[in-house]
Amino acid sequence: MELNPDHAIVTKFKERFEKDPMDTLLSDYAELLLGDGLLAEGSPIPNPVRYNQILADLMPRTL
């Protein structure tokens, strides 16, 4: 998986990290990003239950 450093996801991730490196959501977002990349290439994700939990927890926060 390649990350485009100019992509909005990466720039927002960096901004959030610079604002608060201890932000607990950063690890959740990183895990989702990895899972998304693995799924996009057709690979299995290491922990589908955890992936689903993170996604279900984050969705209501952004709606």
Image: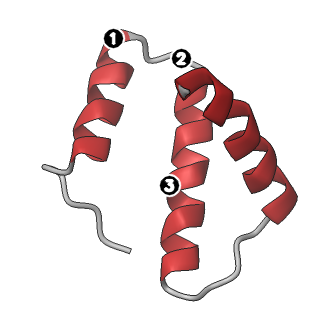
Mark 2 vs 1: CB contact within 8 A? yes
53 or 4: nearer the viewer: 53
User: Can you give x and y, in whole percent of width and height, for residue 43 in the image?
Assistant: 62, 85
The residue tagged 1 is: 19
| Disc sitting over residue 33 in the figure | 3
Q: Earlier in the sequence, mark 3 or mark 2?
A: 2
User: Can you give x and y, in whole percent of width and height, for residue 10 in the image?
Assistant: 28, 44
Element assignment for label 1: helix
Element assignment for label 3: helix
CA gap, disc 3 and disc 2: 16 Å
Q: How crowded is mark 3: few (under 14 residues within 10 Å), some or many (20 or more)?
A: some
Q: Residue at x 49, y 78 (%)?
A: 40
Mark 3 vs 2: CB contact within 8 A? no
| Disc sitting over residue 32 in the figure | none
Q: Earlier in the sequence, mark 1 or mark 3?
A: 1
| Disc sitting over residue 23 in the figure | 2
In this rendering, position of residue 47 left or right of residue 36: right
* Residue farthest toward the bottom in the current orientation of the protein: 42
Tag nearer the camera, 1 or 3: 3
